[in-house]
Image (tube, rainbow, N blue to C red):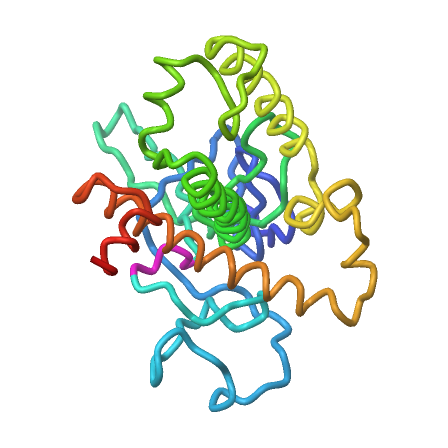
Amino acid sequence: MATTTTAAASHFFGTRIHGAVVKQRSGKFQARFSFGKKKSPPAKKARPTRDSDRLVWFPGATPPEWLDGTMVGDRGFDPLGLGKPTEYLQYDFDSLDQNLAKNDVGELLGVITDSGELQPTPLQPYTEVFGLQRFRECELIHGRWAMLGTLGAIAVEALTGVAWQDAGKVELVEGSSYLGQPLPFSLTTLIWIEVIVIGYIEYQRNAELDPVKRLYPGGYFDPLGLASDPGKLENLQLAEIKHARLAMVAFLIFGIQAAFTGKGPISFVATFNR
């Protein structure tokens, strides 16, 4: 006998179903099919600012509705719509009547949306890899590496005269070194050390299920205690994301510059004085 219930917080194949009207039938299974249908995200508590006062990535640009300004540094930039929340439709299996040789199309059971919760699974705790929270995490991580890489490319060329794209060639010929100083490890040993250390750090990072601590772990990563003042925390987070985006653009320019001219950033700028 069919009954109708509201699945307010039931799990289906590891995904939480929110507010979906589901028909339960005895002897039947539920299947999930993705039809790429999109919907607006659930209502969030936005900041008390007017749309006219909001900063956007381009003057006069209209930010998409899923970028409502609640994230630090949100300027409404998503031209490809990658962060738009995805909605999945849940259908019954088609029924089979052997006497009539007829298959009835399965009925729509409800809607499945990503809960945004992190799961204790290794390496990939996100149930939706195209969610806004994961995009922000990836943006920060790539931006932090880009800041280190940009500073490193300039510092190494300034101190050794070797462009960043040629540093690997020098290592293969002259052996491993750092800022011109030889290291007591072979290049192969350094690669294994990096793989083990970074692999361990990434595994531990993905074991953290607190979304805030995944982005801003603090502790050893804030030795000066700059983020201890809650009044300055948001300004520091905004400054970091701005510098991270600028560094990613800068290192992209470094790569294009090296590919077309074969020069590092300092040697390329020096050509303007000739």
Return the x and y of residue 112 as percentages of the image width and height: 49, 49
Question: Of 86 and 6, which appears nearest the observer?
Answer: 86
* 233 drawn magenta: no
Return the x and y of residue 267 as percentages of the image width and height: 30, 47
Residue 26 shows up from this direction: yes
In the shown orientation, is residue 260 left or right of residue 88?
left
Rendered image quadrant of residue 165? top left
In the shown orientation, is residue 105 left or right of residue 9?
left
Residue, x 66% and y 48% (percent of image)?
Answer: 211
Question: Of 232 and 135, which appears nearest the observer?
Answer: 232
In the shown orientation, is residue 5 left or right of residue 157?
right
In the shown orientation, is residue 180 left or right of residue 193?
left
Q: Main secondary structure of the magenta part?
A: loop
Question: Of 42 and 169, which appears nearest the observer?
Answer: 169
Residue 113 shows up from this direction: no
Return the x and y of residue 258 as percentages of the image width and height: 25, 42
Residue, x 53% and y 39% (percent of image)?
Answer: 127
Residue, x 78% and y 72% (percent of image)?
Answer: 231
Q: Is residue 59 above or below residue 25?
A: below
Rendered image quadrant of residue 240? bottom right
Could you tell me which quadrant the C terminus lies in? bottom left
Residue, x 60% and y 29% (percent of image)?
Answer: 202
Return the x and y of residue 153 as percentages of the image width and height: 42, 41
Q: Going by the picture, which residue comes out furthest to the left?
A: 260
Q: Give the magenta range.
A: 80-84
Question: Of 118 and 182, which appears nearest the observer?
Answer: 182
